[in-house]
Amino acid sequence: SDPTARIPATLIAGDGIGPEIMEATLAALDALGAPFDWDAQTAGLGGVQACNDPLPPATLDSIRRTRLALKGPLETPVGGGYRSSNVRLREEFKLFANLRPALTVIPGGRFDKIDLVVVRENLEGLYIGHEHYVQIDGDPHAVAMATGINTRAGCRRILEYAFEHAIATGRKKITLVHKANIMKALTGIFKETGEQLYEEKYKGRIAFDTVIVDACAMKLVLNPWQFDVIVTTNLFGDILSDLVAGLVGGLGMAPGANIGADAAIFEAVHGSAPDIAGQGIANPVALMLAAAMMLEHVGHLDKARRLRQAIDATLNIDKVRTGDLGGKAGTAAFTQALVARIRGA
Ligand code: NAD
């Protein structure tokens, strides 16, 4: 493909600190000469304010056209209000894979030199929202029930993606995480499908093992360096991907990608941080790392590398850091230092 071609992409600044960290990220992408032609759209609270819809049709149309988006955090009202726009985006574009890399950016922490990826199944499992109560003796909520669904096809799709992605990015090992000793059907199908797929297509191309989720959690804390790529079902992936974000300094440094059959959406893992919104102190690194993943996704590996190097130099050589990392810089000062690194060094 033509390396100078422009790439249409949807831009959703998001709520809370979203516009602040998005402005910072766009400044970095501009300095890099990134190829994106942005189509700015709204969602979340911003969508409600702009057109009374947390996921306006224009936003959906835009992503249908571009199949690519960079998204700030979207606010979801707790208990009632509207359904999470993030969940709706996931369903609408069949974003079956959630990719959460954990990479040490600031050395010398409790866990140094971490470099692993959690690939989480994003559409099935216990997160499908089939829940209900059973009434007993006049108590309408006497029993609570939830149904989980994992399909052979859904398992195969996420596992195949994980294997292909791991091999394409030079990874050495995939660990399939399950709870098939207890949930023999629901997570047994995932384990079985992974083992079959490995025998069928990937044996000899990458190492493969399986581990039970509780043991995995312990191992991640005792010795995270034994892991390379972790692939797991929805609920376990949700928990383990936050755990690995904690290994590398918390949510302010954690990017995520939602990859689907019909689109790919890149975002920071953290939320809209309403407690610090509008103060100019938010850390834009997570969204910038999401932008680096997006550059890699469209094949601009060199620009992604330059962005990662500039983030590294700004944090570790210039020692310009935002408050959540123990520094004194605001979002603008950090961004200025980063842009100088991109342009100069
Ligand atoms: P949060 O991630 O917004 O905030 C948790 C804590 O981390 C806060 O103290 C916040 O100030 C801090 N923090 C988060 N990002 C930071 C950054 N970049 N720099 C510095 N500090 C940062 O989580 P929350 O408070 O539970 O959620 C707030 C809102 O965000 C909710 O409406 C929630 O639904 C939404 N949310 C959206 C997404 C998303 O769009 N992907 C993800 C999580 C939460």
Image (tube, rainbow, N blue to C red):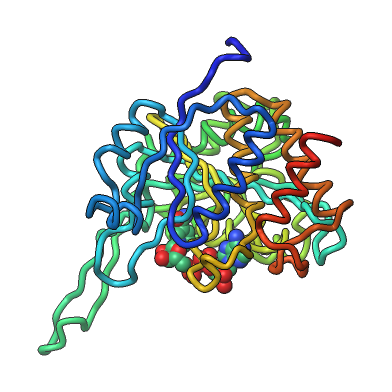
Q: Is residue 146 left or right of residue 71?
A: left
Q: Residue at left 54%, top 59%?
A: 270
Give x and y (percent) for residue 241: 58, 56
Q: Can residue 214 be seen at all in this image of the molecule?
A: no
Near-viewer residue (242 or 158):
242
Q: Is residue 325 left or right of residue 69?
A: right
Q: Residue at left 75%, top 46%?
A: 338
The total number of labels drawn is: 0
Q: Quadrant of residue 46?
A: bottom left
> Compared with residue 197, is residue 174 higher up or lower down, i.e. above or below?
below
Near-viewer residue (315 or 172):
315
Near-viewer residue (331 or 292):
331
> Compared with residue 88, is residue 278 higher up or lower down, i.e. above or below?
below
Q: Quadrant of the N terminus?
A: top right
Q: Residue at left 56%, top 15%?
A: 5
Give x and y (percent) for residue 80: 25, 69
Q: Residue furthest top?
A: 2
Q: Quadrant of the C terminus?
A: top right
Q: Residue at left 24%, top 78%?
A: 143
Q: Is residue 5 left or right of residue 229?
A: left
Q: Is residue 212 left or right of residue 207?
A: left
Give x and y (percent) for residue 281: 63, 65
Give x and y (percent) for residue 319: 85, 57
Near-viewer residue (194 or 278):
278
Q: Can residue 160 be seen at all in this image of the molecule?
A: yes
Q: Quadrant of residue 68?
A: top left
